[in-house]
Image (tube, rainbow, N blue to C red):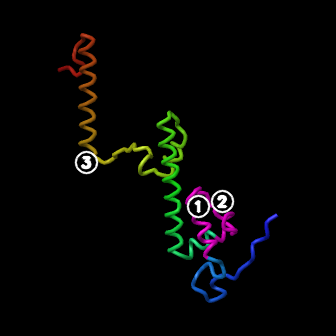
Amino acid sequence: MSEPETIRPHARDTGDARPWAGVTDEKRVAFLVQLSNTANVRRACEAAGISRPTAYRWREADPDFAEQWDAALECAHDLVEEGVFKSGLKGGEDGRFWLKSHRRDKYGDRASLDLTSGGKSFADVLAKLRVRKEARARKAQEAQGGADPTGG
């Protein structure tokens, strides 16, 4: 059974500017290395022997650590992307959902809808739609060999 985590004073209590006061740099490195290999905060915390709240407290209090955390996640995402690419070459489809959610800018769905009128008034847009509708009705009527539905 593992030893319980030693309770250490928080930086505010010791006057130390580092949010991980009393914690060895080895724990911080162990956390970042595991995170870069797994993209899993729980596993990274276990590897470093710290709790999740501690890790998130460090992240919130230290911009450098937050930047290192983000870089570690990018490394892990690169590993997954490489694995998905290799499995894709073999005909596998594993990991596509993961890539779409974690690398949305590169692999996410790109559907978009432009709801602007292009500077035209609402009346102009309606008039254009009405003209298109009449043209479709005329074309359909002509295809059936009938008279012009608009009376023209």
- The answer to whether marks 1 and 2 mark residues whose Cβ atoms lie closer than 8 Å is yes
Kindly identify the residue that appears in the image at 40 percent across and 42 percent down.
Answer: 111
Q: Pointer 1: what residue?
A: 35
Q: Nearer the viewer, residue 60 or 144?
A: 60
- The answer to whether marks 3 and 1 mark residues whose Cβ atoms lie closer than 8 Å is no
Main secondary structure of the magenta stretch? helix
**Disc number at residue 118?**
3
* Residue 152 lies in the magenta-colored region: no
Tag 3: Cα neighbours inside 10 Å, few (<14), some, or many (≥20)?
A: few
Which numbered disc, 2 or 3, marks the residue closer to the eye? 2
Please tell me whether mark 2 sits on a helix, a strand or a loop.
helix
Q: Pointer 2: what residue?
A: 43
Range of residues picked out in magenta: 25-54
Q: Nearer the viewer, residue 106 or 89?
A: 89
Q: CA distance from mark 1 to mark 2?
A: 7 Å
Kindly identify the residue that appears in the image at 26 percent across and 43 percent down.
Answer: 123
Please tell me whether mark 3 sits on a helix, a strand or a loop.
loop
Q: CA distance from mark 3 to mark 1?
A: 47 Å
Where residue 136 appears, as percent x and y from the top left, is 27, 24
Tag 2: Cα neighbours inside 10 Å, few (<14), some, or many (≥20)?
A: some
Tell me the quarter of the image containing the N terminus. bottom right
Where residue 148 appears, as percent x and y from the top left, is 22, 17
Tag 1: Cα neighbours inside 10 Å, few (<14), some, or many (≥20)?
A: many
- The answer to whether marks 2 and 3 mark residues whose Cβ atoms lie closer than 8 Å is no
| Figure check: 5 above or below 119 | below
Disc 3 marks a residue whose amino acid type is Gly
Q: CA distance from mark 2 to mark 3?
A: 51 Å
**Location of residue 19 (image quadrant):** bottom right
